[in-house]
Amino acid sequence: MAHDASLSPNGVPEVEHPLRQLWASFSENKGAVFGLFILCGVAFLAIFADFLAPHGPLEQFRDAVRAPPVWEEGGSWRFILGTDGLGRDMLSRLMYGARVSLFIGLVVMAVSFVVGVLLGLVAAFSSPMVDTIISRSMDLIMAVPGLVLAILIVAVLGPSLTNTVVAVTVVFLPRYVRLVRASAMAELSKDYVIAAKVIGVKKLRLMFSTVLPNCLAPLIVQSALGVSEAILEAAALGFLGLGAQPPVPEWGAMLADAREFIRSDPWIVTLPGLAILITVISINLMGDGLRDALDPKMRRS
């Protein structure tokens, strides 16, 4: 049986730091560690694309239109992953595309998290009428299929990267609101909350200092998994022509641009698809590890 504390030289128990405990539990899941490693690699390429990319994402090479990757006959190290239908370097566009896709995923997660926490806590602590209004509004959003709702919002606002973020955020907001509301209402009946009310703790402090910290574990897991889902949703909108607009190197838009070459030059379609697949799987693996680390009941025996 593992112990959280050990004895120091003077005989005083030393409590292990919570982050160290979290990493110890997280690292037991080898798939999660692998996912974190891959995600860090993708993030590194995205952040330092300006220095690592061999060419600009919009730079066209008319003498090398649809050049094959280096492992194909006729390929060269000048364009390691080949070029697209306009002669743009695929490797460079994938690096810059990682920046766009991760940006969408992180912004959607952050905005959904903040707004979801606020609405969820308000629903849990307010009158039954306010709770009903917020809950039924979230139910109404969830009643519409996510992609259909996102398409509707973008159709009204107009296709752009900003409106893609808005649409995907609206689609994902209800899951955060419902999760926070359910977790907060479960905490309200516990002794420590009742004691805080008795001694006169103000409502805002009760919401954010007393109850919210005990609701964070499932929220963190949901946030990690939400990033991958937001990337997929944004890629779907981009593929339909409703997301980031050309010439922005977004992976979904790259897939849409390459549809006509799926038979003649399959690498132009395959590479953005693989980038989405690898990134989403790595985030999901990491989220699975976070779930195991934060919820002892989910840990592998």
Image (spheres, helix red, strand yellow):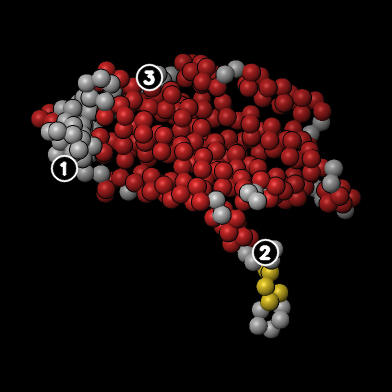
Separation (CA) of disc 1 from disc 2: 52 Å
Q: Quadrant of the N terminus?
A: bottom right
268 left or right of 195 in image:
left
Residue drawn at point x = 77 percent, y = 24 percent? 132
Residue drawn at point x = 23 percent, y = 37 percent? 81
* Mark 3 lies on residue: 241
Q: Are marks 3 and 1 in contact (CB under 8 Å)?
A: no
Q: Are marks 1 and 2 in contact (CB under 8 Å)?
A: no
Task: Report x, y in % for residue 142.
Answer: 63, 22
- Amino acid carrying mark 3 in the image: Gly
Separation (CA) of disc 3 from disc 2: 53 Å
Which label was assigned to residue 275? none
Between 276 and 33, the one lying in front of the other is 33
* Residue situated furthest front in the rendering: 301
Circle 1: is it few (<14), some (14-19), or many (20+) Cα within 10 Å? few
Q: How many marks?
A: 3
* Mark 1 secondary-structure assignment: loop
Work out whether mark 3 precedes mark 1 in sequence or the reverse, and give the earlier one. 1
Residue drawn at point x = 51 percent, y = 51 percent? 30
Quadrant of residue 82 in the image? top left
* Mark 2 secondary-structure assignment: loop
* Mark 2 lies on residue: 2
- Amino acid carrying mark 2 in the image: Ala
Between 38 and 28, the one lying in front of the other is 28
Task: Report x, y in % for residue 158.
Answer: 43, 19
Task: Report x, y in % for residue 58.
Answer: 24, 33
Which label was assigned to residue 77? 1
